[in-house]
Amino acid sequence: MHPKLIEGVDYYLNEQGYIVFTAAFHLKRGHCCGNGCKHCPFAYEKVPEPRRSQLLKAGKTRGEASSEGENQACG
């Protein structure tokens, strides 16, 4: 059974009403899922190229951390 998710801790709803998982949620999960999640703390390690490079570049332009273990730009 999956643990219950807590809004504001594990996820939030964006302006369009979509669920966006937080970096804390991803860290609890323990690995990159490869979907290019907005708050991936694993530097998109399982996202295939060229998408991975695009996401990393977009994160830098938004001023987000780019090293592993820090907040990156999943929802």
Image (spheres, rainbow, N blue to C red):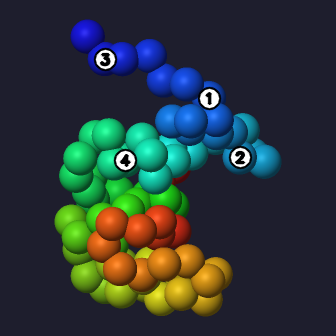
Q: As shown in the figure, which amino acid type bears the numbered disc 1?
A: Glu
Q: Which mark is residue 38?
A: none
Q: Quadrant of residue 7?
A: top right
Q: Quadrant of residue 9?
A: top right
The amino acid at mark 4 is His
Instruction: Check if mark 4's residue and mark 1's residue have beta carbons within 8 Å.
Output: no
Judging by the rendered image, the residue that carries numbered circle 2 is 14
The residue shown at (51%, 47%) is 22
67 to 41, vertically: above or below: below
Provide the residue designation for mark 3.
2
**Position of 53 compared to 19: left or right?**
left
Looking at the picture, which amino acid does disc 3 mark?
His
Where residue 26 is drawn, which disc sits there? 4
Where disc 2 sits, the SS reads loop
In-image side of 2 versus 31 (left or right):
right
The tag earlier along the polypeptide, 4 or 3, is 3
The residue pinned by badge 1 equals 7
Do residues under tags 2 and 1 come within 8 Å of each other at their CB atoms? no
User: Which element type, helix, strand or loop, lies under badge 4?
Assistant: helix
| Residue nearer the viewer, 67 or 16 | 67
- Of all residues, the one furthest to the top in this rendering is 1
Q: Earlier in the sequence, mark 2 or mark 3?
A: 3
